[in-house]
Amino acid sequence: MLSITDIDRPPDWQGAADAVARDGGVAVVLGAVDTGKSTLCRFLAHCCAEAGRKPAILDADLGQSWLGPPTTIGFALVDSTTPPDHGTEPAGMWFVGATSPQGHMLQTAVGVRKMADAARRAGADCIIVDTSGWINGPAARALKEAKIALLAPGHIIAIQARDEIQHLIAPHASRTDVQVHTVRASRRARRRDMDQRRRHRGEQFRNYFAGAAELALPLGQIGVLGTSLLSGTAAPSHVRSYAEELLGIECFHAEMTEERLLLVCEQYPQPGAIEALREQFPDQEVAVLPLRAIRGGVVGLSDAQEHLLGIGVLTDVDFKANSLRVITPVAAADAVATVTMGTLRLQPDFSELGPVEVRWP
Ligand SMILES: Nc1ncnc2c1ncn2[C@@H]1O[C@H](COP(=O)(O)OP(=O)(O)OP(=O)(O)O)[C@@H](O)[C@H]1O
Ligand SMILES: [Mg+2]
């Protein structure tokens, strides 16, 4: 990323920075893709540090993330006037599990607030929030509204070329507790196409997973979030063999509650087979989870106090060995208390494969 002296400062950037440095608190930066949001955040952090504040940058962009790997929200404390850069070790991270907030609005909103609270606890008196360039439409607006409500910023800084951010900032114009600044993008802001963005994410993942190894996490010792898998009781063996007969495939695992029957197999059964099984269990929700569809899925590994230790790639759920196998740079398997299932799948070389094809049951 650019050094501070190389950042071009359109005239209205300094005024916004002075106001943020004066007041501290939370400043949310909004803008379309490639408008220079991350650059502005680094500039704001630099100005705040120069004014004697203890700023933090909170990177709430899941795809073009630079504090922590893609799929996470991270924050870094800025303890000198040199702002954080790609590769700066985040002081805290939150796992969302996808590179876009669409379909993960709650996890994103929760994560933003959790990380802002953590930054404050870590001593930040000024939190600068970098957001994604997803600004159009009702869903994007709902997420930005939620972020603003949860963060209670004193300043909103909108990089606006024409009037594209207006629908996000107009509702706050009459508030007395937040000051809205509209600033211009630098002429030096450069566009990247979808391919470059994807390649950039691939590079981020590869850097993150350099030196990663496979961990076996004992199923009995971890909680699993993002799915109901492993929350039921083992189905009686006659239920499992009956299900195998109707599905026509082997089931590695069968669990049930009063409401549902969940079976884990290697692949999907033949069309119609699940329906035949559902007819036999009309009072329960019947779900089949094919391992083939979830291998390569990104997961978050957290300790017993909900701190994200790192992310990993699921390689197997091994019911014979009773363990979850994950490739991760996290070294201490003992420290992992919960695993959160994401929805993005990676290839063995850590490039993106696409979303997990099944909904986690
Ligand atoms: N003020 C500036 N001075 C010099 N270069 C800039 C400036 N603003 C943006 N750029 C350049 O434009 C590119 C995009 O900037 P940046 O990454 O900050 O945008 P962004 O809005 O955060 O993008 P994204 O939507 O991908 O998160 C970068 O190469 C950056 O160096
Ligand atoms: Mg950015």
Image (spheres, rainbow, N blue to C red):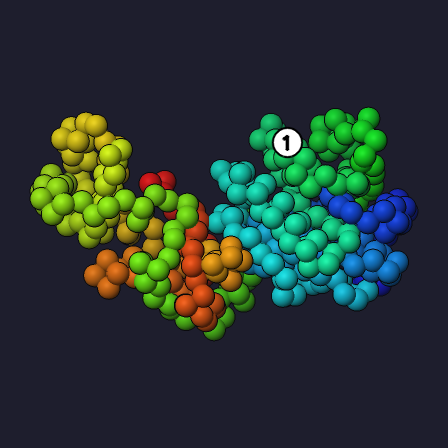
Name the residue: 45% across, 71% down.
Answer: 331
Position of residue 169 in the picture relative to residue 348 (left or right): right
Q: Nearer the viewer, residue 261 or 345?
A: 261
Q: Secondary structure at mark 1?
A: helix
Residue under pointer 1: 141
Q: At which x and y percent is residue 117?
A: 65, 50
Of 189 and 218, nearer the camera is 218
* Count of number-bearing discs: 1
Q: Nearer the viewer, residue 214 or 37?
A: 214
Locate the C terminus and report the quarter of the image it occupies: top left
Residue occupying image coordinates x 30% and y 49%: 230
Percent of width and height locating residue 155: 80, 41
Residue 259: x and y, percent? 27, 33
Q: Is residue 231 left or right of residue 200?
A: left
Image x and y of residue 206, in percent: 51, 65
Q: Seen from this angle, which residue lies furthest bottom?
A: 211
Is label 1 within 8 A of ligand 1 (CB to nearest ligand atom)?
no
- In-image side of 97 versus 63 (left or right): left
Q: Quadrant of the N terminus?
A: bottom right
Q: Is residue 276 left or right of residue 126?
A: left
Q: Residue at x 43, y 62 (%)?
A: 336
Residue type at mark 1: give it. Arg
Give me the residue at 78% from left, 47% from top: 25
Residue 212 in sight in this render: no
Task: Judge the density around disc 1: few (<14), some (14-19), many (≥20) Cα neighbours within 10 Å.
Answer: some
Whether residue 321 is visible: yes
- Work out whether residue 354 or residue 314 is closer to the camera in this orientation and state it: 314
Residue 169: image quadrant is top right
Task: Decide: is 309 above or below 33.
Answer: below
